Amino acid sequence: MKENLTDIELIKLANTGDEDSMTTLYYRYRDWVYGLAFRFCGNKEDAQEVLQEVFLYFFNKFPGFELRSALKTFLYPAVKNTSISIIRKKRKVISIDDSAALNIPDEAVDRAAEYSDLSHYLEGMTKDEKELVLLRFYDELKLNEIAEVIDVPLGTVKSRLNRLLARLKEKIKKI
Amino acid sequence: MTKKDDISTTEDLKLADLDAVRTGEATPAPGINRDDRQVLDDLEKISEIFAWAKPDAGEIPESVDQNVLSLIKDKSREIKRSRKVVRIYPGFKWAAAAAMGIIVCLISYTQLHDSHDSPAPEKNMKVLQAEYDKPKKKTLLSENKTIPVYSGSDKSVHESPDDVDGNGRVNIIDAYIMDRRLMSGVSMPKKLDLNGDGKVNSEDINTIVKTSVSLGKGEV
């Protein structure tokens, strides 16, 4: 195993067919992918299916995969879209508007809010605001990673997060 | 400039900037004050609440890991196999490219050649037949050709009837000129009926040729 290597170094080796590097990448990100999939899907079975689908998609990019940003920003849309696809397949509902797949279903965001006391903190927030807070505190993405994932400038992310943190700060004071 | 550098501490975005400090994305500004420390504590608390609220998805089953690891093994083998081909035959890529180039050239040449020489395969026989049936171009002294004889004068014909170009010498040029005139259908003076058969034709040209190649007979 090559735990000390960076993602870029591992990907470079994986492009040559190095099995250890691929395995290290899997173990480095599997829990994060699984947690995210579980947030979107709401059950373990689907989350496990998403986990396998996402890594199948990822490793099929080799050889020739180039990492242009953080690996999480590559994996995040893959997890999100695969989860939505699996949720829809299970529901047997075919959406006419395919663009809907680009957005996280409301229930996937709300599902996270249902856990414990989070609904209290996320109360009054729009779907996008909730998603931003969840990306930051739940999925533990960095500011630049969030900017890439939701495709807005870093300054916009900071400004939105600043506003949301002010509201969250007020709420925790009341506890 | 790194992403870390992008995070500047301004009053407007203080909470977001301090949150970046909390996660280690940014370094705390020197001389951080008590209020900022308090804000950092609050942000840490928010983070803990979310972490605590995170549902336990449970352990990932061994079978899931095995599936992915098996996929990795297959993929690794596939990549190594494709790389091995290139390693065994180092010039493989170049050879393939050269072969492809030659094939393209051959196809282009064949198509070009066909478009010029063969209008269409089914027409080939007809074209050949037409070529065969077409009257052959008459060459010098090729056949007897009779043209009308006129009795007018011709400046090119001088005292010696053989000297067609009137240069004072009877040579192969005279035969050539006469043949050209016969071929083009120009009326020939009666004087050029050199063999006296009443016709100006290729027999008369033969007479000029015989005269021109005879030793000592070229001079008029």
Image (cartoon, rainbow, N blue to C red):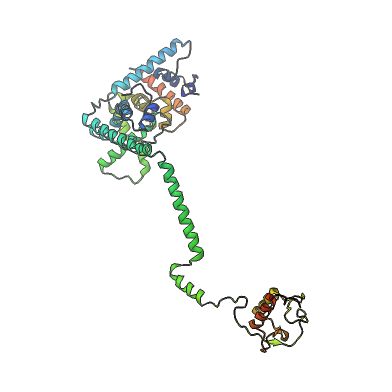
Q: Residue at x 38, y 18 (%)?
A: B43
Residue B105 placed where, x, y %?
48, 53
Query: In which quadrant is the C terminus of chain A drawn?
Result: top left
B105 and A105: which one is in front?
A: B105
Query: In which quadrant is the N terminus of chain A drawn?
Result: top left
User: Residue A12's image quarter?
Assistant: top left
Residue B198 placed where, x, y %?
67, 89
Q: Residue at x 62, y 78 (%)?
A: B141
Q: Is residue A93 above or below residue B188?
A: above
Residue farthest to the bottom, as pictured: B198
User: Residue B203's image quarter?
Assistant: bottom right
Please indicate whether residue A28 sits to the left or right of residue B209 in the image: left
Residue farthest to the front, as pictured: B215
Please indicate whether residue A67 sits to the left or right of residue B214 in the image: left
Please indicate whether residue B72 sits to the left or right of residue B180 in the image: left
A70 and A117: which one is in front?
A: A70
Q: Is residue B157 above or below residue A60?
A: below
B17 and B184: which one is in front?
A: B184
User: Residue A70's image quarter?
Assistant: top left
Regarding residue B74, the answer to whether it shows in the image is yes
Residue A157 placed where, x, y %?
44, 27
Q: How many marks?
A: 0
Regarding residue A125, the answer to whether it shows in the image is no
Q: Is residue A165 above or below residue B179?
A: above
Residue B146 placed where, x, y %?
64, 85
